[in-house]
Amino acid sequence: MTFDAATLSGIVVILIVLAFLVGTVRGVERRSEQKIREVARQTTLISRSELARELCRVVHKRYPEACPGLDFTIREDENGVHISAWYLKSPKPDEERIEMKG
């Protein structure tokens, strides 16, 4: 069976598009898995730490749309509980003010 140039070009284009789609889906899958793991870590921290729960309450009161693990992450160390990353476009809360309110 022989194929003309147009048919071969069409097959190559379809294969390239399929490879691109597979790569895109795998990237989305990888990022989704990372987000799920981060939300799980944040949930575990919040469930074990009253200070973490209080920090989340204060942040949620000021930013009701903020979700721990998605919009911000917290960490606990020897100095207490802190916001370690802030992903919202709203300004990151000042931790000194948060501690004074908490």
Image (tube, rainbow, N blue to C red):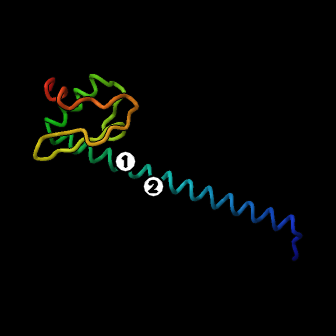
Q: CA distance from mark 1 to mark 2?
A: 10 Å
Q: Which residue is mark 1?
A: 36
Q: From the viewer's perspective, is residue 1 above or below residue 44?
A: below
**The image quarter in which residue 9 lies:** bottom right
SS at badge 1: helix
Q: Residue at x 59, y 58 (%)?
A: 22
Q: From the viewer's perspective, is residue 95 above or below residue 16?
A: above
Q: Which residue is mark 2?
A: 30
Q: From the viewer's perspective, is residue 13 above or below residue 65?
A: below
The image shows residue 67 at horizontal and vertical percentages of: 33, 34
Circle 2: residue type: Arg
The image shows residue 32 at horizontal and vertical percentages of: 44, 49
**The image quarter in which residue 24 lies:** bottom right
Dot 2, how many residues are within 10 Å of its Cα: few (below 14), some (14-19), or many (20+)?
Answer: few
Dot 1, how many residues are within 10 Å of its Cα: few (below 14), some (14-19), or many (20+)?
Answer: some
Circle 1: residue type: Ile
Residue closer to the observer: 30 or 1? 30
Residue closer to the observer: 61 or 44? 61
Q: Residue at x 34, y 50 (%)?
A: 37
Earlier residue among tags 1 and 2:
2
